[in-house]
Amino acid sequence: MSKIRITQIKSTIDRPKNQKATIIALGLGRISKSVEVENTPQIAGMVNKVNLQVEAEPPQEVTKEQNLDLGINQKLVLKEVRCHFSVVYPSLVSNP
């Protein structure tokens, strides 16, 4: 089966209990939260039930270059944090 990405775009405030329960069953609960699930008839029915609150689309493919970019950015953030702590709390940072 193919996968779909479901994103909650509206709040569940002032919605019936069955719609709130459907949002929770889909693994959502906050606006802008996304999940990737198999596209089964059951999931399609749940999305149809709360179609005003969610957005469904095919998942994005992450290329190898994007993965490398993410890794570089994470290393830079960790390096900045390490430098910050070494200035403020030199005893907390071990020397590499």
Image (cartoon, helix red, strand yellow):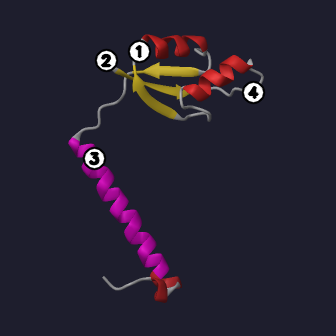
Element on which disc 2 rests? loop
Observer able to see residue 36: yes
The image quarter containing residue 29 is: top right
The residue tagged with tag 3: helix, strand or loop?
helix
Mark 2 sits on what residue? 1
Separation of residues labelled 3 and 1 (CA atoms): 29 Å
Q: Provide residue 58's location: percent of width, then percent of height.
A: 37, 22
Q: Dot 1 surroundings within 10 Å: few (below 14), some, or many (20 or more)? A: few
Q: Position of residue 64 (x, y in %)?
A: 21, 43
Three-letter code, disc 2: Met
Q: Are marks 1 and 2 in contact (CB under 8 Å)?
A: yes
39 drawn magenta: no
Q: Earlier in the sequence, mark 3 or mark 4?
A: 4
> Pointer 1: what residue?
40
State the CA–CA distance, disc 4 to disc 2: 33 Å
Q: Which residues are magenta?
A: 64-85
> Where does the N terminus fall, quadrant-wise?
top left
Q: Amino acid at mark 4?
A: Ile
Q: Which residue position holds label 4? A: 13
Residue 93 position in % (x across, y down)? 43, 83
Q: Earlier in the sequence, mark 3 or mark 1?
A: 1
Q: What amino acid is at disc 1?
A: Thr
Viewer-nearest of discs 3 and 4: 4
Which residue is found at the position 52% from the left and 85% from the top? 89
Query: Helix, strand, or loop for circle 1?
Result: loop
